C-alpha cells in the first residue's frame, strides 16, 4: 500500500514556510531555500540576543560619560567613586537618572566626587 506522507510532512513544511513569510523572492515560497533561511535567521536571533545586552551597556556608558563631563568629571572617575562607595546603582539606573533627572545626577556626582 502506498503512503503519501501528506499530513505530518505537510505540517512540517508549512511550519517552515509560515516562519519564512516576508522573506524576499523564493526564500518565502520554496521549501528548500526557506529551510536554509530559517536556520540562518534563528542563528542570528540567538546571537543578537546577546549582542543587544552589549549594545545597551555601551549606550549607558556613553550617556553616563556625557553627563559626567557636563558635571566636571569623567566616566572612569565617577564609576571608581561609585564602586568605592556603598551605593548599589547599575549603569542602566544611572543613565536613566542622567537623562530624566539631571539635577539628581548632578547631586550624585557632587556627593561621590
Image: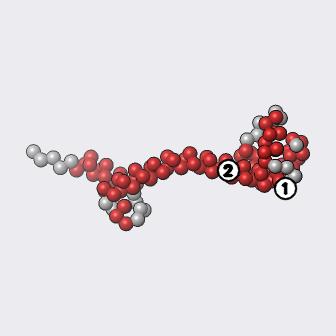
Residue 46 x %, y %: 49, 46
- Image coordinates of residue 78 in percent, x first then y, are 81, 44
Q: Is residue 91 left or right of residue 5?
A: right
Looking at the image, do the residues carrying marks 1 and 2 touch, with CB atoms under 8 Å apart? no
Which residue is at 31% across, 52% downward? 13
Q: Which of the image's four quarters has the N terminus? A: top left
The secondary structure type at the circle numbered 1 is helix
Residue shown at the point (51%, 47%) measured from the top left = 47
- Mark 1 Cα-neighbour bin, 10 Å: few <14, some 14–19, many ≥20: few
74 left or right of 90 in image? right
Residue 70: give its label.
1
Q: Residue at x 44, y 49 (%)?
A: 42
Residue picked out by circle 2: 58
Write the residue at 27% across / 46% down.
Answer: 8
- Distance between the alpha carbons at the discs numbered 1 and 2: 19 Å
Name the quadrant containing residue 82: top right
Front-lying residue, 7 or 56 = 56
Q: Residue furthest bottom?
A: 25
Q: Nearer the viewer, residue 71 or 9?
A: 71
Estimate the x, y position of residue 104 in percent, counting from the top left. 85, 48
Residue 59 visible, this orientation: yes
Give the image location of residue 25, x and y in percent.
37, 66
Which element is circle 2 on?
helix
Amino acid at each position: 500500500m502506498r503512503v503519501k506522507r501528506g499530513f505530518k510532512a505537510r505540517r512540517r513544511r508549512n511550519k517552515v514556510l509560515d516562519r519564512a513569510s516576508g522573506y524576499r523572492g523564493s526564500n518565502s515560497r520554496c521549501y528548500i531555500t526557506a529551510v536554509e533561511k530559517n536556520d540562518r535567521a534563528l542563528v542570528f536571533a540567538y546571537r543578537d540576543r546577546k549582542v543587544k545586552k552589549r549594545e545597551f551597556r555601551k549606550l549607558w556608558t556613553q550617556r553616563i560619560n556625557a553627563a559626567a563631563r557636563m558635571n566636571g568629571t569623567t566616566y572612569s572617575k565617577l564609576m571608581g567613586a561609585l564602586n568605592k562607595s556603598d551605593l548599589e546603582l547599575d549603569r542602566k539606573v544611572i543613565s536613566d537618572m542622567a537623562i530624566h533627572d539631571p539635577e539628581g545626577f548632578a547631586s550624585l556626582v557632587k556627593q561621590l566626587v
